[in-house]
Image: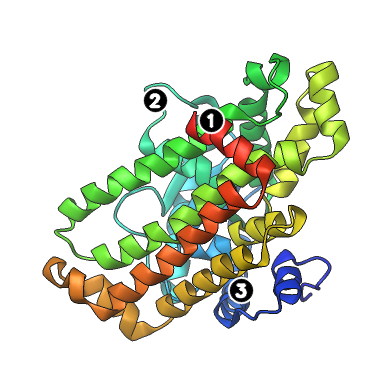
Amino acid sequence: MEPSLQTDPILNLQSQVGEEWPAIQQARKTTAEINAKLAKALEGLPSTDAAIVAFGSLARKEWTKSDVDWTLLIDGQADPEHLGIAQKVAQKLESEGFTAPGSSGIFGNMTFSHDLIQKIGGREDTNENTTRRVLLIQESEVLGKPDAYTRTLKHILSRYLKDDRGLRFGTIPFKVPRILLNDIVRYWRTITVDFVDKQRVHAGHGWGLRNAKLRMSRKLIFATGMLTCFSCELLSCNGAREDLLKNHSTVAMEEHLRTFVQKTPLEILATFLLERRIKRETAVKLFSSYNAFLALLGDADKRDRLKKLPFDEIPTDAVFGEVRSISHVFQQGLTAMFFDDDEKLRELTIFYGVF
């Protein structure tokens, strides 16, 4: 079923501001076609204790041309057959012509729910574990049976909120899950630092494309991660906030978050722009720049140029200059949204995002 103006925040926003973003809409359409192809190829593979979960542009509904970042999420007893299922997933994707995930080892293998749920913080919460957990919340799409995925996401959000004593018992008037927000901030800071490490390890190959994604899609994830946390204060129902204040119960707020994170990052952004009545100029800057970014990634020649861009040509390269210009407009839109257009958003951003 095609999304309607009433149910789709991006279409709603597009109508309200009187703009069209064809690259965004084309990417969403292409993603739906790819997901249908994947669902057919992977039909019957996982059981109720495992789920195939996609990340990246496929989960964000921003598919242009990319590899498929996936994991076999296991939420059950250890079973030697799980490895065989993961291998079959990889074989199926390869046979369908999809490029395998990168060499980082984060995707294209098995992930166990125990690590995601129990190892939040501490020495055992590795970069890989943090990445998988945060992306499961912010940009994931289950392919096939959802049971294991749904259970794991529920327990992760429950851990974040129930362990947040400040959220449940604190005297601060705002109801924002600080532990979850801090993990989202930690993930963003980690990938910005790891970007430099990849630059060294890969001897600069692919730097231009990774830099473009860091400026746009990675930053979008961070921004909408903050908005997701702020939604507990600004967009949740009165009952969820009252349950926290009067009963110190997080159950209703957990349900709010489980529902809210089913939106893609762009849908979350559009939701806030609409609900908080952010200025039209800001909305146009954010979505028009992101539309230009997806159009650029969809251009095979420009994408290839970014992949092969030598360091010494960065200052004068026309394609990278385009990336730089697009990202500056996107940053201007984010700055206006978080600091200028909405007093409550500004207050929350300073209180939670700065200090």
Mark 2 Cα-neighbour bin, 10 Å: few <14, some 14–19, many ≥20: few
Name the residue that disc number 1 marks. 114
Q: Secondary structure at mark 2?
A: loop
Query: How many angstroms separate mark 2 from mark 1 (CA)?
Result: 12 Å
Mark 1 Cα-neighbour bin, 10 Å: few <14, some 14–19, many ≥20: some
Instruction: Kindly identify which numbered label has been placed on residue 124.
Output: 2
Mark 3 Cα-neighbour bin, 10 Å: few <14, some 14–19, many ≥20: some
Q: Mark 3 vs mark 2: which is more N-terminal?
A: 3
Q: Are marks 3 and 2 in contact (CB under 8 Å)?
A: no
Query: How many angstroms separate mark 3 from mark 1 (CA)?
Result: 33 Å
Instruction: Kindly identify which numbered label has been placed on residue 157.
Output: none
Name the residue that disc number 3 marks. 28
Q: Are marks 2 and 1 in contact (CB under 8 Å)?
A: no
Is residue 51 visible in this depiction of the protein?
Answer: no
Horizontal arrangement in the rendering, residue 160 relative to residue 103 (left or right): right
Residue 328: name its quadrant. Answer: bottom left
Residue 325: name its quadrant. Answer: bottom left
Q: Secondary structure at mark 1?
A: helix
Q: Mark 3 vs mark 1: which is more N-terminal?
A: 3
- Where residue 155 sits: x, y (%)? 65, 32
- Where residue 267 sits: x, y (%)? 66, 61
